[in-house]
């Protein structure tokens, strides 16, 4: 891996550990591919609470966009029930925020595996 690759990888990990960027609902929906109404529904029902939920107006960070895509993947492609998908994304967000790198996610309806380590 080159020095530029190392730096790019470190930047990406930093961006997943800390809120970066600030996107209004319309832009967050465009960038994530998740409908605006769904983003608000997930926030309202504690399915996914964005980093800037307390702001006025509410906003989503870059890492929020990544995690809502994971949530949508678990819901739509893997067919994980909403409460379990939400819990898995919260757990993944905490795992990443703790400084753990993630290079590969695998999931089925009952489990989420991060780099081969299975979590419920």
Image (cartoon, rainbow, N blue to C red):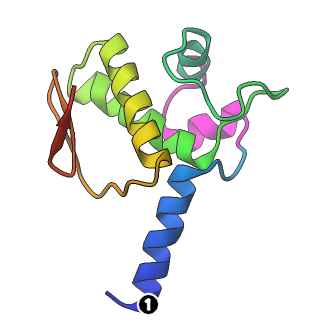
Find the magenta span and give its range.
23-37
- Residue at the spot 47% in from the left edge and 61% down from the top edge: 13
- Quadrant of the frame with the N terminus: bottom left
Q: Locate residue 118 relative to residue 47 in the image: left or right.
A: left
36 in the magenta segment: yes
Q: From the viewer's perspective, is residue 22 above or below residue 74?
A: below
- Quadrant of the frame with the C terminus: top left
Q: From the viewer's perspective, is residue 58 above or below residue 102?
A: above
Check disc 1 and report the residue beneath it. Answer: 3
Badge 1 marks a residue whose secondary structure is helix
Q: Locate residue 31 relative to residue 99 in the image: left or right.
A: right
Residue located farthest toward the bottom when viewing the structure as drawn: 2
Q: Picture quarter containing residue 43?
A: top right
Q: x%, y% of residue 75?
A: 31, 22
Q: x%, y% of residue 91?
A: 39, 31
Q: x%, y% of residue 116?
A: 14, 48
Q: From the viewer's perspective, is residue 1 above or below residue 63?
A: below
82 in the magenta segment: no
Residue located farthest toward the right when viewing the structure as drawn: 56
Q: From the viewer's perspective, is residue 20 above or below residue 75?
A: below
Main SS class of the magenta portion in the image: helix
- Residue at the spot 38% in from the left edge and 37% down from the top edge: 92
Residue located farthest toward the front when viewing the structure as drawn: 98
Query: How many numbered marks appear?
Result: 1
Q: x%, y% of residue 32?
A: 51, 40
Q: Picture quarter containing residue 2?
A: bottom left
Nearest to the observer: residue 4 or residue 31: 4
């Amino acid at each position: 891996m080159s020095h530029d690759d190392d730096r790019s990888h470190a930047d990406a990990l930093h961006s997943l550990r800390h809120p970066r960027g600030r996107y209004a609902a319309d832009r967050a929906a465009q960038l994530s591919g998740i409908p605006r109404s769904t983003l608000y529904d997930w926030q309202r029902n504690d399915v996914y609470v964005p980093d800037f939920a307390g702001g006025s107006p509410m906003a989503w960070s870059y890492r929020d966009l990544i995690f809502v895509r994971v949530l949508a993947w678990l819901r739509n492609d893997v067919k994980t029930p909403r409460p379990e998908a939400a819990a898995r994304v919260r757990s993944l967000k905490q795992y990443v925020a703790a400084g753990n790198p993630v290079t590969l996610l695998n999931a089925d309806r009952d489990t989420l595996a991060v780099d081969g380590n299975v979590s419920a």
